[in-house]
């Protein structure tokens, strides 16, 4: 019989039922398994609900989210999870059979930290927008760095994440990078563990990939502007580095004929300046960040709460 661990797996989705079904198939093969799978659905349709019903044996639970945005979905997931340890992946991923068990072992060893894992491309790396194939573990604790976290493969204590303020719901994209930066800047522990493995599957068309890379850059520009606006000049170095990377991407397109969908750098010059400007305006005096609403004093993460009586507010 498969062991069940007191872990909540949270999956944000915007209505990709076939991909979600593949993810659930992989979760069903996990040994041990998580005690619940929380699906935060922003699709406003019925297809996701049908998939969730088909996998009731995984203790799947559908949470409808009326808004849109990655930060909002992740905050709703944090609030709705029934367990202190939250394990994240996305609807376009599949997980290794030992994924839950390895995440549990890492969090048991370091319950106050974040562990993020290895993300491999499911097929063609050129068509996969985000992956990390590094076999060497790394401790990012103390590194004021915002690109270490892979939200499609991470585990965190939900109360500590909520105490930090959750994810910034205003950011158009890259709320994970902002969360990562705030987490390590606050002195919290963050480790990369390559034995915690998921696969990220490509499904976008070339045009969709090109737009995605521009959106990534816009979101990252807003992250830089948010912290620069608050006097954090440390953001100047990565922002400058990104702009240089964008120039190299432009050169690769002109000289080598590399198409925009195959090179994330080519989205930088179109997205980053826009994000910087939007973020600078948005985070001016009087800006009330959405995660501020989450900054309430949580109970200490000393024991599991009653999963039958715990309820969470909608986000």
Image (tube, helix red, strand yellow):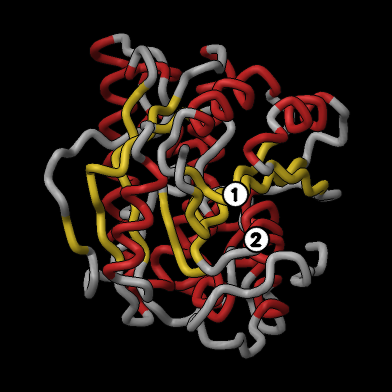
Judging by the rendered image, the residue that carries numbered circle 1 is: 10
Is 44 in front, or is 179? 44
The CA distance from mark 2 to mark 1 is: 7 Å
Which residue is rendered at x = 57% and y = 58% of the image?
277
Marks 2 & 1, CB-CB < 8 Å contact: yes
Using residue 174 as the reference point, say whether residue 81 is left or right of it: right
Instruction: Residue 96: name its quadrant.
Output: top left
Mark 1 lies on a secondary structure that is strand
Residue 160 placement (x, y as % from top left): 50, 77
Q: Nearer the viewer, residue 258 or 150?
A: 150
Label 1 crowd (10 A; few <14 / some 14-19 / many >=20)? many
Mark 2, other Cα within 10 Å: few <14 / some 14–19 / many ≥20: many
Up/down of 232 relative to 35, above or below: below
| SS category of the residue bearing label 2 | loop
Is 22 or 215 nearer to us in this picture? 22
Give the mark count: 2
Q: Which residue is mark 2?
A: 81
Above or below for 131 versus 167: above
Residue at 65% from the left image edge and 60% from the top image edge: 81
- Above or below: residue 98 compared with residue 142: above
Which residue is at a point 59% across and 32% down the rendered structure image? 91
> Could you tell me which residue is drawn at 30 percent across and 72 percent down?
189
- Disc with the residue nearer the chain's start (2 vs 1): 1
């Amino acid at each position: 019989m498969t062991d069940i661990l007191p872990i909540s797996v949270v999956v944000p989705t915007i209505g990709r039922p076939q991909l979600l079904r593949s993810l659930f198939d992989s979760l069903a093969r996990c040994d041990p398994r998580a005690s619940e799978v929380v699906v935060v659905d922003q699709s406003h349709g019925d297809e996701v609900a049908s998939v969730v019903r088909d996998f009731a044996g995984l203790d799947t639970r559908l949470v409808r989210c009326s808004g849109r945005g990655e930060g909002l979905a992740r905050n709703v997931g944090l609030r709705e999870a029934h367990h202190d340890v939250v394990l994240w992946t996305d609807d376009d991923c599949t997980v290794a059979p030992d994924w839950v068990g390895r995440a549990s072992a890492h969090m048991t060893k370091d319950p106050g930290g974040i562990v993020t894992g290895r993300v491999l491309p499911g097929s063609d790396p050129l068509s996969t927008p985000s992956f990390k194939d590094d076999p060497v573990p790394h401790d990012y604790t103390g590194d004021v760095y915002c690109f270490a976290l892979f939200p499609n493969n991470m585990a965190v204590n939900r109360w500590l994440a909520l105490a930090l303020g959750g994810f910034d719901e205003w950011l158009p994209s890259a709320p994970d990078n902002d969360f990562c930066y705030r987490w390590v800047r606050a002195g919290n522990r963050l480790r990369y563990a390559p034995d915690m493995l998921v696969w990220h599957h490509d499904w976008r068309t070339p045009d969709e990939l090109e737009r995605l890379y521009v959106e990534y850059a816009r979101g990252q520009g807003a992250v830089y502007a948010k912290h620069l606006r608050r006097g954090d000049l440390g953001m100047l170095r990565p922002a400058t580095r990104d702009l240089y990377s964008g120039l190299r991407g432009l050169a690769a397109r002109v000289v080598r004929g590399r198409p925009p969908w195959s090179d994330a750098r080519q989205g930088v010059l179109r997205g980053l300046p826009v994000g910087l400007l939007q973020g600078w305006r948005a985070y001016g005096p009087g800006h009330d960040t959405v995660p501020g609403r989450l900054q309430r004093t949580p109970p200490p993460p000393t024991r599991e709460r009653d999963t039958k009586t715990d309820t969470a507010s909608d986000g």
